[in-house]
């Protein structure tokens, strides 16, 4: 029976596939492009080895890169060979190394006798190492732990390349030697004669960083050994190390595995390559068979690279090369378009790129479609419209995929697709804590664990499952402010029946949590808070239940080391995860019938769909996507930006070749702020003869006519709206409130309108102490009771010492502030005006907007009074020095909020006391020096036109607030904490 199945499948192979299956002995490299049937030839080749030789199934080793790949290969083998297929060794590289370690425990005492280190413990360990280390570069003054994650990432990368501490030290030494031998390192004439040229100082800095990284790598490895722990990458490194040292063990494995096969070899890193090399190293012409495609090498961030793929050809120059050219997935148009794109990538002399030939018998080959919309909202509407057309033409939802570059892109797509009644499935490893039920549960758990903390408690008050109306919550917050008591005190003193019921429950849960196990506490809160009903009523109840179970498993796993873990113990663990930005992922199922697939292009690798939409195909999201390279590691050309663009191009190639019938590439011309977005260069690299332009005029017009709202939510209650509008009229607008609204309406709502309690962070406390010190200093200066530089420093020490800072933060802030203030004093001491007003507060001025009188208010840091009524208004900034263009909003990373602040002050003074003061200029004084220790200030003349434009802006914002027209909107920031919090308010 097995022979019949083999023969049937073998007859269906094309010439090149048969060649790959029939070439049993010696090194073979198969270039298998997308859709060329590589899994089939791998499994048939294994079956053929067993047919044509006397090799036992146990003597064949097949390695791949994912557990799903292992499962797929195993299923295929069993379907061809029957039970014999179970005897073939099929592993991932890690599971293979784990098997070697288990079978030979005496050779791996560090692994067998140790424990795997958790992600949290890795970060905490590195924090401890850096905290006590003497470092010049990797321990910046303002944020001494800034490099913790980059250092760990670099160590991970080094291990994936099988580079030990000693090897890394050697390479860094060679890197420095080559650098110092550069001919034109120093300027030989002019003002900077003898100094290193600017273009080389950056390179020198990276080498110095690498030298410190060597020490941190060594300390990390020593600490792991001391704690009897190992990390994920150590497993492969240890096996490589022991196979090099223990020749008997290596020989035993070489004798065991007579045939070695590796799938998706372009995804390999150097440590994995060394495993292959060692296992096949007994013979000059080993039976090593690798399958891969350099055009799909997209996992450089995991240590994989084109260089590692090409390493095989260099290591075995006589290897037989077989290129599969027949494609059984895509139309010829898609293949030709993809080939024209990849032709722009840097190639290699070792591997010839062949054009794939479609074997589909399609009646027609549709062109690749390109669509450019006015903005991202219109783009999402376009995608939804096109998907609905496909669904109406009886295309199954699961045969449609929307691909994007980054996970965050799903956040702006899903709500609009949902609005168009398109059911979606976001595939991939999703953050467990972002699930709607788990997120609500965590908010409640935090509030119970820290009952009495106003900031945490307030977030829980807005949950839609606890039975409180938003109006009751707004009034409770207002009561706490007006009576100068905490929200907690207002809550427990409330006579409102709903509020009192929630207060009683919180008290009971808090007591229960202190005395019972964390899982019992979670069960009680989940049952009594309305969360169980919330879960049952979800549209995706099955998926939601699975996620909640995964969360409970996570809680159990993270607290099992403690004999009796309470909620407090788990909250400490959760805080560590958040502090170190560590995600806990929930692996989604690969296929869900009846749902359109949404996923990153990386996740789409190996999958295929009838119709593919590639969204947000802009330069910003692809080739100009931010990629920080803190270290120039001496690993091939790791710092080469051309490699980054090539990797992105290959990723785009992968996206194109997921499609069977048609690809639609879309992108917006502008973001939500109106800033221009440039199409990805990869679109223009596709031969235009394979592309058609979609007319998006109707979509753009449709989007223009849509209201601001893009999310379906419950309408705001009339009483709630009236209360919020009365709050706005009572409180008015400050420039901070205005800027917050323009940044995100919901940031304004929570921070400035209803003013939820918020604990000040370190930099805010630092800024407050600076402002307090300068006020005292200039108050004394105005009254001719001048304070000295040391007086200013002492005053700052006094103020910063009163702030709720940790000992470490206090020490750093004190040192930083003294340097800044003393430098500020030395730079400007001869330029100050005696006639001035400090912390000049303006309240009670109104701007007429139609029938409304909008209250405006503000606090001016310093007003220098000149001749007559003319003044110069100064605002202090304690953050990083910004350029004039930054201040005016003329750069990509700025929004003009600082310049708007000065214009707002001019408007305030114009309305104040019948225009007593005329503001001609506004000045931004940066208290912090720049990187070279120099202080900066920027002065602007504020025109009447500037003021008129601001009035229009205030008018528009005021109308939106009074009309609550922002209620269903969301800002462009995909991970906005305020928009996330708003989801509870909008229910």
Image: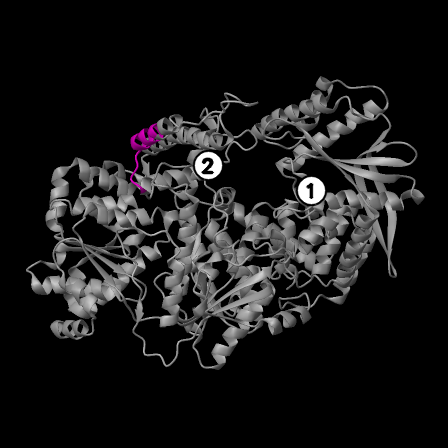
In this rendering, would 677 be left or right of 246?
right
Queried whether the magenta region covers residue 617, the answer comes back as no
Residue named by callout 2:
148
Magenta span main SS: helix
Question: Where is residue 609 shown, x and y percent of the image?
Answer: 39, 70
Residue segment shown in magenta: 161-174
How many residues crowd around disc 2 within 10 Å: few (fewer than 14), some, or many (20 or more)? many
Residue named by callout 1:
887
State the quadrant of the C terminus.
Answer: bottom right
On the question of residue 484 being in view, the answer is no
Image height of 709 relative to 439, above or below: below
Q: In terms of depth relative to the viewer, which is nearer, 136 or 188?
A: 188
Q: Residue at x 31, y 66 (%)?
A: 356
Image height of 423 relative to 556, above or below: below
On the question of residue 247 being in view, the answer is yes
Image height of 458 relative to 3, above or below: above
Question: Where is residue 950 shown, x and y percent of the image?
Answer: 79, 51
**Quadrant position of residue 722:** bottom right
* Mark 1 vs mark 2, CA separation in Å: 31 Å
In this rendering, would 334 be left or right of 103?
right
How many residues crowd around disc 1 within 10 Å: few (fewer than 14), some, or many (20 or more)? many
Q: In terms of depth relative to the viewer, which is nearer, 392 or 839?
A: 392
């Amino acid at each position: 029976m097995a022979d019949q199945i083999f023969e049937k499948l073998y007859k269906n192979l094309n010439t090149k596939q048969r060649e790959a299956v029939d070439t049993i002995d010696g090194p073979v490299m198969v270039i298998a492009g997308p859709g060329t049937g590589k899994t089939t030839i791998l499994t048939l080749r294994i079956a053929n080895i067993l047919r044509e030789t006397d090799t036992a199934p146990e003597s064949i080793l097949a390695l791949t890169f994912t557990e799903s790949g292992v499962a797929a290969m195993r299923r295929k083998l069993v379907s061809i060979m029957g039970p014999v297929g179970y005897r073939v060794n099929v592993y991932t590289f890690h599971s293979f190394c784990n098997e070697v370690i288990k079978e030979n425990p005496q050779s791996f005492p560090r692994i067998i006798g140790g424990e795997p280190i958790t992600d949290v413990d890795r970060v905490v360990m590195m924090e401890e190492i850096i905290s006590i280390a003497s470092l010049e570069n990797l321990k910046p003054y303002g944020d001494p732990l800034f490099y913790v994650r980059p250092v760990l990432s670099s160590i991970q990368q080094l291990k994936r390349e099988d580079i030990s501490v000693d090897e890394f030290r050697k390479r860094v030494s060679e890197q420095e030697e080559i650098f110092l031998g550069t001919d034109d390192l120093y300027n030989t004439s002019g003002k900077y004669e003898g100094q290193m040229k600017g273009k080389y100082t950056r390179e020198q800095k990276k080498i110095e960083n690498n030298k410190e990284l060597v020490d941190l790598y060594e300390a990390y490895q020593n600490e792991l050994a001391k704690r009897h722990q190992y990390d994920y990458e150590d497993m492969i490194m240890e096996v490589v190390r022991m196979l090099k040292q223990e020749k008997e063990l290596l020989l035993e494995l070489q004798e065991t595995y007579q045939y070695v096969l590796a799938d998706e070899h372009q995804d390999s890193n150097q440590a994995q390559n060394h495993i292959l090399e060692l296992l096949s190293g007994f013979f000059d012409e080993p039976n090593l068979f690798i399958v891969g495609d350099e055009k799909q090498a997209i996992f450089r961030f995991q240590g994989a690279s084109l260089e590692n793929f090409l390493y095989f050809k260099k290591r075995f120059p006589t290897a037989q090369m077989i290129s599969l050219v027949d494609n059984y997935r895509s139309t010829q148009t898609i293949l030709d378009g993809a080939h024209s794109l990849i032709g722009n990538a840097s190639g290699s002399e070792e591997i010839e790129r062949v054009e794939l030939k479609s074997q589909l018998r399609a009646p027609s080959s549709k062109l690749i479609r390109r669509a450019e919309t006015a903005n991202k909202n219109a783009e999402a509407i376009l995608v939804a419209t096109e998907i609905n057309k496909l669904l109406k033409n009886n295309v199954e939802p699961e045969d449609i995929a929307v691909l994007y570059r980054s996970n965050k892109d799903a956040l702006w797509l899903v709500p609009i697709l949902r609005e168009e009644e398109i059911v979606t499935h976001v595939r991939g490893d999703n953050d467990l804590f972002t699930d709607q039920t788990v997120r609500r549960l965590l908010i409640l758990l935090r509030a119970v664990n820290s009952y009495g903390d106003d900031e945490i408690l307030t977030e829980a008050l807005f949950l839609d499952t606890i039975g409180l109306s938003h109006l009751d919550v707004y009034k409770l917050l207002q009561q706490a402010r007006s009576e100068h008591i905490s929200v907690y005190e207002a809550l427990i003193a409330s006579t409102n029946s709903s509020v009192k019921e929630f207060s009683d429950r919180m008290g009971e849960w808090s007591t229960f949590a202190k005395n019972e196990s964390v899982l019992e506490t979670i069960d009680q809160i989940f049952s009594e808070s309305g969360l169980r009903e919330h879960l049952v009523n979800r549209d995706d109840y099955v998926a939601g239940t699975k996620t909640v179970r995964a969360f409970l498993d996570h809680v159990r796993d993270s607290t099992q080391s403690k004999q009796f873990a309470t909620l407090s113990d788990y909250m400490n663990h959760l805080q560590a995860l958040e502090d170190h930005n560590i995600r806990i992922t929930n692996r989604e199922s690969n296929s869900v019938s009846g749902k359109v697939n949404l996923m990153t292009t990386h996740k789409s690798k190996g999958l295929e769909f009838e119709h593919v939409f590639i969204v947000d195909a802009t330069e910003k999201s692809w080739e100009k996507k931010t990629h920080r390279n803190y270290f120039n590691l001496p690993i091939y050309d790791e710092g080469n930006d051309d490699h980054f663009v090539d990797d992105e191009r290959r990723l785009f190639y992968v996206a194109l070749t997921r499609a069977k019938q048609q690809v639609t590439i879309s992108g917006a011309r502008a973001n939500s702020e109106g800033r221009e977005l440039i199409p990805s260069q990869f679109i223009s690299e596709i031969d235009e003869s394979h592309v058609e332009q979609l007319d998006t005029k109707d979509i753009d017009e449709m989007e223009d006519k849509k209201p601001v709202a893009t999310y379906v939510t419950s309408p705001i209650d009339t009483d709630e709206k009236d209360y919020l509008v009365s709050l706005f009229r009572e409180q008015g607008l400050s420039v901070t409130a205005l800027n917050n609204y323009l940044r995100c309406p919901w940031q304004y709502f929570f921070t400035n309108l209803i003013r939820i309690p918020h604990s000040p962070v370190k930099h805010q406390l630092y800024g407050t102490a600076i402002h307090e010190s300068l006020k005292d200093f200039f108050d004394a200066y105005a009254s001719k009771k001048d304070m000295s530089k040391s007086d200013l420093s002492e005053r700052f020490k006094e103020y910063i010492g009163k702030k709720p800072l940790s000992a470490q933060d206090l020490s750093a802030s004190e040192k930083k502030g003294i340097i800044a203030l003393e430098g500020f004093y030395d730079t400007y001491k001869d330029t100050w005006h005696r006639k001035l007003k400090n912390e000049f507060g303006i309240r009670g001025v109104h701007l007429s907007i139609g029938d409304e009188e909008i209250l405006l208010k503000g606090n001016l840091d310093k007003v220098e009074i000149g001749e007559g009524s003319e003044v110069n208004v100064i605002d202090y900034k304690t953050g990083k020095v910004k350029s004039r263009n930054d201040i005016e909003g003329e750069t990509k990373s700025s929004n003009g909020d600082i310049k708007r602040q000065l214009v707002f002050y001019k408007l305030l003074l114009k309305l104040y006391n019948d225009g007593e003061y005329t503001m001609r200029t506004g000045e931004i004084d940066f208290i912090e020096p720049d990187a070279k220790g120099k202080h900066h200030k920027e002065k602007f003349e504020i025109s009447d036109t500037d003021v008129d434009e601001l009035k229009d802006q205030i008018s528009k914002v005021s109308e939106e607030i009074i009309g609550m027209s922002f209620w269903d909107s969301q800002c462009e920031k995909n991970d906005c904490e305020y928009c996330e919090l708003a989801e509870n308010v909008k229910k």
